[in-house]
Image (cartoon, grey):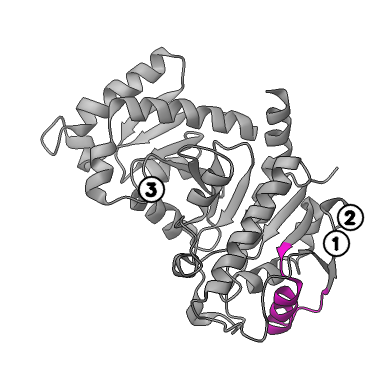
């Protein structure tokens, strides 16, 4: 049976609705799952018109009513956008609130088991702030809604997977957070996350921090003092941890299939690798929560909202990744 994937529209003033409309216009999505928009029906209708999609829009009262028919965009309609005041490409409190509401509703449905995973279109931090939402992004919102401390972020593009030890902190703070105990904890959690996704392998390579992993202390000693002891402790526990491996080589090795995943030490280290390889098809997966969430890894692109120029490859890949991993994730959650 195909999983039902709840697809949130993101900020209504951004490109989210347009890339969702384009993604739903591809039969491959319907072959993999029953996709269901969680958003505003009027917004997705407008987006279909903008991008020239001929799909009909049909509202459903509950995910169980979704049929997953190609050529039809099914929507759980929250009806929370005043179309007369919607201005594409601008920061609006109404849109920030609507984007938050879509996420909150999807989380509720995922907790209930009405949808098996959620795939999210981009939201805007300024719009959230204008709406009085205290959280700055998807990960923080999801963590609060699921009562999850420090959710894991996993990037996937093709078969390269990248976890992140630190995310939205300064580079100085990130370096300060690279401590043995934190690395060991993340190796444990990342291994568990791979198992929950049904990934057959669980070997994780740790990226080095300094050039050539410090060259035996000549270019910094964090690799020797923090990373090596952490990897050794993880190995002693039976985890398949390797490294540290220089950041200038590790991602190429990952693309060759040398290990199941990489543990990137800071935001840009892994982001640059994934996005340089394929900016549009990089998918972000949030793990460590009781629900599964995938997402595009780009912003609302207000500058091109309403022009039909936005590339929908990332949205398509996010939905397909959710469909791919949802069965194993749900089965693993039920077994706990």
* Residue range (magenta): 38-56
Q: Are marks 2 and 3 in contact (CB under 8 Å)?
A: no
Label 2 crowd (10 A; few <14 / some 14-19 / many >=20): few
Pointer 1 and pointer 2: residues touching (CB < 8 Å)?
yes
Position in image of residue 85 (x %, y %): 62, 85
- Is 142 placed above or below 332 here? below
For residue 60, which numbered disc appears in the image?
Answer: 1
User: Where is residue 298 shown, x and y percent of the image?
Assistant: 49, 63
- Spatial CA distance of label 2 from label 3 is 38 Å
Where does the image place residue 48, in percent across and percent down from the top left?
Answer: 73, 78
In the rendered image, which residue does mark 3 sit on? 167
Q: Earlier in the sequence, mark 3 or mark 1?
A: 1
Q: Report which residue position mark 2 lands on.
A: 65
Taking the spot 80% from the left edge, 57% from the top edge, the residue there is: 30
**Would you say 191 lies left or right of 120 here?**
left
Give the Cα separation between the discs numbered 3 and 1.
37 Å
């Amino acid at each position: 049976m195909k999983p039902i994937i709840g697809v949130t529209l993101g900020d209504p003033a951004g490109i989210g609705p347009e890339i969702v409309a384009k993604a739903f216009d591809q039969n491959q999505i319907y072959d993999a799952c029953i996709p269901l928009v969680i958003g505003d029906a009027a917004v997705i209708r407008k987006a279909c018109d903008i991008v020239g999609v001929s799909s009909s829009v049909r509202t459903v009262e509950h995910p169980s009513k979704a049929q997953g028919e190609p050529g039809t965009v099914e929507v759980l309609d929250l009806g929370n956008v005043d179309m007369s005041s919607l201005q594409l490409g601008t920061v609006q409190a109404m849109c920030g609130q609507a984007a938050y509401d879509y996420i909150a509703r999807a989380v509720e449905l995922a907790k209930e088991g009405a949808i098996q995973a959620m795939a999210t279109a981009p939201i805007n931090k300024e719009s959230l702030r204008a709406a009085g939402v205290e959280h700055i992004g998807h990960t923080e919102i999801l963590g609060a809604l699921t009562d999850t401390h420090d959710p894991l972020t996993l990037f996937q593009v093709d078969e390269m997977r990248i976890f992140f030890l630190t995310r939205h902190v300064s580079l100085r703070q990130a370096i300060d957070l690279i401590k043995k105990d934190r690395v060991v904890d993340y190796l444990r959690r990342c291994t568990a996350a791979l198992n929950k996704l049904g990934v057959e392998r669980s070997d994780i390579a740790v990226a080095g921090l300094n050039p050539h992993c410090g060259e035996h202390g000549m270019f910094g000693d964090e690799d020797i003092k923090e990373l090596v002891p952490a990897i050794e402790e993880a190995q002693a526990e039976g985890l398949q941890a390797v490294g540290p491996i220089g950041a200038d080589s590790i991602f190429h090795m990952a693309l060759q299939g040398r290990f199941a995943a990489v543990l990137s030490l800071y935001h840009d280290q892994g982001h640059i690798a994934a996005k340089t390889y394929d900016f549009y098809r990089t998918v972000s997966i949030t793990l460590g929560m009781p629900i599964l969430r995938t997402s595009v890894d780009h912003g609302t692109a207000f500058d091109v909202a309403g022009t039909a120029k936005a590339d929908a490859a990332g949205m398509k890949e996010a939905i397909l990744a959710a469909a791919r991993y949802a069965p194993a994730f749900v089965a693993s959650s039920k077994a706990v």
